[in-house]
Amino acid sequence: MSESDESLTQLERNAKRVLEESVRRIDGRTRSRLNQARQAALAAAGARRRAWFGSFTLMPAAGAVAAALLVAVVLWHREPAGTPPVALDAQHAAAVEDMDLLTDNDSIDLMEGWDGSFYKWAATQSDAGAESNT
Amino acid sequence: MPEFATLASPYSMPAALHGDVDLTDPEEKTQTRALNQFLAGVELKAFKIAQAALRHEDDALDAVQDAMLQLARAYSDRPPEEWKPLFYRILENRIRDMQRRRTVRGRIMAWLPLRGEDDDEEYDPIAQAPSLEPQPVRRLELDEAVGALEQALGRLPPRQQQAFLLRTLEGLDVAETARAMGCSEGSVKTHYFRALQALRAQLGELHL
């Protein structure tokens, strides 16, 4: 009790004395068993603490493994210098050809010197080519 | 004599018992020392409190041991000033569990043939023999007072008994007792006051 003994009643003071006396009378066997229990508890606390710190000591190793895996994945996906480009499908190939036409200087010249007869001729050529193919 | 030096330290006991405990870390050493000091300070009083509640020495020892282990495993990293209410809270829960189990066991045993509780214990004439040492009158008075108080405490309702013992024997203040009992400070005051009234009715002022 935090209150001073003066504030206690006679019964409280006497009860405290009697209880303390009964604690003093606890036999050696019981004291020994309590001591063993305390040592077991201390060992348990130590083991828990070591397990906690053990998890921290494993963290750098786990981080190194994760970093190594990341590097491996990046290297695996990177293409070697001499590898030919991946073959394009038909749709992508047509788009690339259109880009070639658009960027070609010849086509710009054709646009500048607008010649409708050329386009008519070109159209008949392609139609004729299609008919001859069929 | 390095072995003797190791065994002489009370804080190296876990190492001696379990083999793999290394207390070379100074922080761990400090914490272990603080926990050892705390447990050593409460173990005897905790045993008396558990014994008053359970009225069985071995059960009381088990309850105290379980409370120590649980405190060490779950709360040893908490600030030491929090340990006492936590420890007594754990002990209280353990005592309640044991009392509940005992009630269930009692109900089951009521259906079985009668059998004395101490049938398994062999009669030990040396343990049963009265001490031959002459006992001074003072000691006899104290004996009587201890016996009368323990009996009176045994008749108190559990919550009153707990409030009285935590306040009077363990010296917890009202707030700490409330935390240990898991109730309000007002309830602690009520339980304590009623316990005092009941004890006064049975013992008077407990003159020594």
Image (cartoon, grey):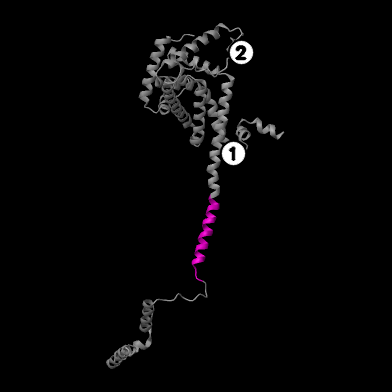
**Which residue, given by chain and number where applicable, does mark 2 sit on?**
B126
Residue B185's quadrant in the figure? top left
In the rendered view, tell whether residue A107 sits above or below residue B187.
below
Give residue B35's position: percent from left, percent from top. Answer: 54, 32
Residue A49's quadrant in the figure? top right
Q: Which residues are magenta?
A: A59-79
Give residue B40's position: percent from left, percent from top. Answer: 55, 26
Mark 1 / mark 2, whichever is N-terminal: 1
Give the class, few, some or many, for how many residues have Cα within 10 Å of label 2's Cα (few <14, many ≥20): few
Give the class, few, some or many, for how many residues have Cα within 10 Å of label 1's Cα (few <14, many ≥20): few
Looking at the picture, which amino acid does disc 2 mark?
Answer: Ile
Looking at the picture, which amino acid does disc 1 mark?
Answer: Pro
**Which residue, given by chain and number where applicable, does mark 1 sit on?**
B26
In the rendered view, tell whether residue B52 sits above or below residue A117.
above
Q: Helix, strand or loop at disc 2?
A: helix
In the rendered view, tell whether residue B183 sits above or below residue B73.
above
Query: Is A128 displayed left or right of B98 in the figure?
Result: left
Whether residue A113 appears in this view of the structure is no
Whether residue B107 appears in this view of the structure is yes
